[in-house]
Image (tube, rainbow, N blue to C red):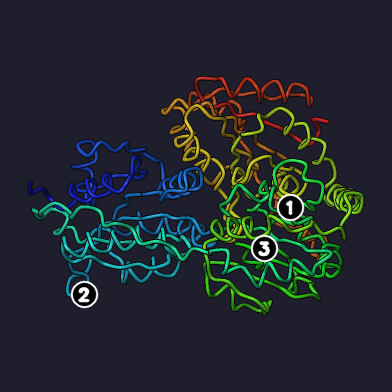
Amino acid sequence: MKRPLGAQISHMLKDRGVDVIFGIPGVHNQEMYRGIEEAGITHVLARHEQGAGFMADGYARATGQPGVAYVITGPGLCNIMTPIGQAYSDSVPMLILSSCLDETQAVRGQLHQMKDQRAAAGTVADWSVQANSAEAAYGLIERAFEEFELSRPRPKHIQVPIAQLQAEADPAPFPNQPALRTKALPPDVSSVVSMLNLARRPLFILGGGCRSNDWRQILSQLGAACFTTYAGRGLPGANYPLDFGSMLPRPGSAEVIASADLVVAVGAELGEVDLWRQDLGQKATLIRVDLDPEVLSDCHRAAIKLQVDSQSFARALWHATQDMKPATGWSPEEVAEMRARWRAEVDAERPGIVPIADALRAAMPADTMIYSDMTQFAYVAKEVWDMAYPHHWHHPTGFGTLGYGLPAGIGGAVARRGKPTAVIAGDYGFHYTMQELGVAVELGLSLPIILWDNGKLKEIEDSMVRSQIAPNAVMAHNPDFCKLAEAFGARSSAPSNVAEMQSAVRAAFDAPVPTLIHVTPDIL
């Protein structure tokens, strides 16, 4: 049956598994809203397009499926460009659909007009294109979903002229049978297996691109030690005795990596925000396994490169090494000693946070999914807080934007109804998106929001001091955060000690609305 194209797009998305759309309607994109309810899709109304984008990001990270957002022409798209950039950096599948003006060259002074809206979004998206017909819109949406499956997942933007959204269109074609990623088979990993057979101290570096849950048994079978990137935390499971943790940025990690006689990096970009140094430090052969050819050809110059799906690589490696004797070059004592040393370094760099992070971890269920913001508390916790499950801590690692934690946590909680989800934010970053508290209240989310309030931009102040710059512009007046939360209809708590903090967190997981838990450094 014919419908306006805006409505047909929602039906097409539903046919491809989309259940939730985040966004804000406006006069330019209202035709996209005509079909949402009819298609059986839930719409979450954000308070700002930046919040909508981060919610879509959080939803995608929780489900592994694309997060979808609808925004209007001009300022709506500009407002969501920061989340698009974050999703690009962190390899998050996101589809942004916006309206656009029908004519921008011959007519000026129109509502929401930009010089080149498509090009603007193209600076942060994987690609940004305009669909000038129903057939083009359907084809581009299909292409986006194919690429989410086949290649490194990154955000896509499709804009549709207002007149096209209003025009009657035939339904979208049925979904294509999706193409299959390049899968690794046991013969494909033969070169890796041969080198593992000779290694006494094999070392794996596991990144966020690893989607398999089999890494603990693989590492145990091989007698291999491992590091994880921040995004790869939890891949070895809890308490794997040869896990160096997410300590790659520690200067001493280069010495450990140099002592390995084989290094295998899987699904890890090994960029600046993974290492905080230029060189990984290896002296032995480096093997890279990744979907992205750009990663495989980077400055680390791997000797062996496999462009394959990490999950199939893990499976093929497991089957090909069943009869292999474990290497014996690493000892749990060596790993424990290094981890203790690095933990002390972390504690010395940002004093007082480690014991609070330990207490917070003890108060949360092991399967809690955490969304953190750019704050010193998260910087510390990401190094010392071991995860029992992979892909359960999400942080704006690459683009590094403030304001991520709360809206992304809302997106994650929407995806994980009935499962524990929590937010960790800093006082300054919370200002960026704190209006999204209203969304969390409307949705009745049992969401603990741990707000670390040191009353300043402490990380920037510390950096200025290290650079011998008199600290400037690092203080901002904060509201009464607890009263603010209550004004939105949320609950609040201002614990005076660690035990009270733990009790507040446990209660928040069962509350009918979100709970803001205001934590200050003097809680110890």
Q: Is residue 123 above or below residue 34?
A: below
Mark toward the viewer: 3 or 1? 1
Q: Are marks 2 and 1 in contact (CB under 8 Å)?
A: no
- Residue denoted by label 2: 105
In-image side of 108 versus 489 (left or right): left
Local secondary structure at mark 3: helix
Residue linked to disc 3:
273
**Could you give the CA–CA distance between mark 3 and mark 2, rounded to whole angstroms?**
41 Å
**Placement of 139 over or under 72, stated as above or below:** below
Horizontal and vertical percent position of residue 177: 29, 56
The kind of residue on which mark 2 rests is Gln
Ranked by sequence position, the earlier of labels 3 and 1 is 1
- Tag 3 near tag 1, CB within 8 Å: no
Residue 426 versus residue 308: which sits nearer the camera? 308
The x and y percentages for residue 463 are: 77, 60
Residue 270 is left or right of residue 157, and the answer is right
Which of 411 and 266 lies nearest the eye of the viewer? Answer: 266
At x 65% / y 68%, what residue is drawn?
271
Residue to which mark 1 is pinned = 221
The amino acid beneath tag 3 is: Val
> Measured from the top left, where is residue 67 in percent x and y?
41, 49
Real-space CA distance between mark 3 and mark 1, rounded to the nearest whole angstrom: 30 Å
The answer to whether marks 3 and 2 mark residues whose Cβ atoms lie closer than 8 Å is no
Q: Secondary structure at mark 2?
A: loop
Q: Amino acid at mark 1?
A: Gln
Specify whether 39 is left or right of 271.
left
